[in-house]
């Protein structure tokens, strides 16, 4: 499951307190989407269903 939120560390702490194994794997913001090590994640190409509704 992927979850986005404004405070990843608070979310991580809450999930772990509930016994849910969780990790921060990336971030999104003014600099685009990146993995937690700073590597840029390229935007995905549109899938076939999206192209039908364009």
Image (tube, helix red, strand yellow):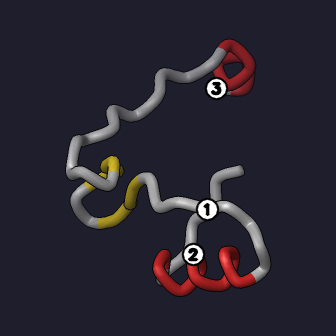
- Residue 12's tag is 2
Earlier-in-chain disc, 1 versus 3: 1
Q: Position of residue 27 (x, y in %)?
A: 38, 60
Marks 2 and 1 close (CB-CB < 8 Å): yes
Q: Is residue 31 left or right of residue 34?
A: left
Which image quarter: residue 5? bottom right
For image coordinates 40% across by 34% down, the residue present is: 43
Residue position marked by numbered label 1 in the rendering:
22
Nearer to me, 30 or 53: 30
Label 3 sits on a secondary structure element that is loop
State how far apart marks 2 and 1 are (Cα): 6 Å
Label 2 sits on a secondary structure element that is helix
For image coordinates 74% across by 67% down, the residue present is: 20
Marks 2 and 3 close (CB-CB < 8 Å): no
Earlier-in-chain disc, 2 versus 3: 2
State how far apart marks 2 and 3 are (Cα): 37 Å
Quadrant of the frame with the C terminus? top right
* Above or below, comparing residue 53 to residue 25 in the picture: above
For image coordinates 47% across by 28% down, the residue present is: 44
């Amino acid at each position: 499951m992927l979850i986005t939120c404004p405070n990843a560390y608070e979310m991580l702490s809450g999930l772990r307190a509930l016994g849910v194994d969780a990790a921060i794997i990336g971030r999104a913001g003014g600099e685009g989407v990146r993995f937690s090590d700073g590597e840029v994640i390229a935007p995905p190409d549109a899938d076939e269903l999206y192209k039908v509704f364009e």
